[in-house]
Image (spheres, grey):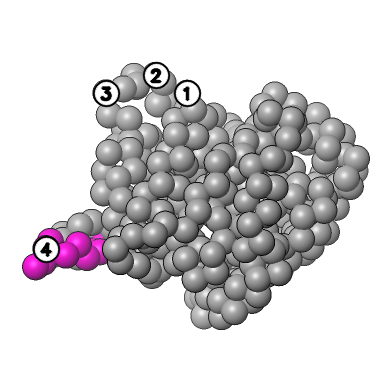
Amino acid sequence: MAKYKPYRFLLYLGLEFLRHLVLVLPRRVNHALAASIGFSAYWVLPKERAKTLRHLKEAFGEEKSKDEFLKIGQGAFVHLAKSAIDVLSFPKLNRKRIEKLVRLEGGTTERLDRALARGKGVIALTGHLGNWELLASYFRFLGYPGCLVGRKIYYGPFDEVLVTLRRSALVTTVYRDESPRQILTELRQNHVVGMSADQDIDSLEGTFVLFFGKPSWTPIGPAKIALASGAAIVPAFMIHEGDHYRLFIEEPIVPMDCDSKEEAIKLMTEAWSQVVERYIRLFPNQWVWMHNRWKTKVEFKSGLMQPRSLEEVAL
């Protein structure tokens, strides 16, 4: 159970006020408000700003200049605020509005439909890039049945707000710490299951794969579920572009036939992680650089790689 912190209730009250405010304002006004919030947050949250710039440096090294890091970092805060405002506006959505808001790269969902034609369901895998919440809603409004696998937020009222917003946009939430049976049931029914798996969470089963050239602890859940169900993994990204979004759907990654299950899991995880990295490089100001993607370190023991936290490494 999360430790009680009084400021969380105050943040919740502010969130509730903002949630109702955005429903009565036009989107352009909401985005102007979001830009102000994001810009202000960048400067009044020095720890988050420092983490963002440090992680950008870790990822790109000498590829980009200090000025570019500053621009990308500030842009990431503004983008996150605008995406959050759009999520708070979910109760306004209907099929007509979402089709006007989202432009489909290539004009077709052919790659998704081709993966579904296998009859094994699809794991729609995205990252914390662009507007990952809107991605799930878009598929649901287009008539694709399914659900979204998410992490329960540490503070109950925050979690209830997010789950309610998803529900208003036709999205059902399945918590990732629940039994995988519901996920497997969805896939057996040839549904689309949404997952975001691009963060270093050492409590989850994972493996080290290269991400921006560095070993990165990466969840293996998507690959394991794909192998267990026969479902294809289809990377997809809802990218903010001007006053609308553009949806990119990548080629399906089908379950691999390897000498061992462990090898297949590793190769499939590497495959989707490379796609996520490619899109982050294309749209760096739309990723959550506040997150420490390289928190877990590698320790070599008897030829095996095991996770270690930064705290453990420092001891």
Which is nearer the N-term, disc 3 or disc 2? Answer: 3
- Dot 3 falls on a residue whose secondary structure is helix
Q: Is residue 205 above or below residue 166?
A: below
- Dot 4 falls on a residue whose secondary structure is loop
The amino acid type found where label 4 is placed reads Gly
The residue closer to the viewer here, 314 or 91, is 91
The amino acid type found where label 3 is placed reads Glu
Nearer to us: label 3 or label 2 = 3
Distance from label 1 to label 4 (Cα)?
Answer: 41 Å
Q: Are marks 4 and 2 in contact (CB under 8 Å)?
A: no
Residue position for label 4? 303
In the image, farthest residue toward the left: 302
Q: Are marks 1 and 3 in contact (CB under 8 Å)?
A: no
Distance from label 4 to label 2 (Cα)?
Answer: 41 Å
Residue position for label 3? 62
Residue position for label 1? 71
**Which stretch is magenta?**
300-309
Image point (55%, 69%), residue name: 229
Nearer to us: label 1 or label 3 = 3
The amino acid type found where label 2 is placed reads Asp
Residue 202 is situated, as x and y percent measured from the top left of the image, at 35, 65
The residue closer to the viewer here, 23 or 206, is 206
Distance from label 1 to label 2 (Cα)?
Answer: 6 Å
Residue position for label 2? 67
The residue closer to the viewer here, 32 or 86, is 86
- Dot 1 falls on a residue whose secondary structure is helix
Nearer to us: label 4 or label 2 = 4
Q: Is residue 290 above or below residue 32?
A: below
Q: Left or right: 90 with respect to 84?
A: right
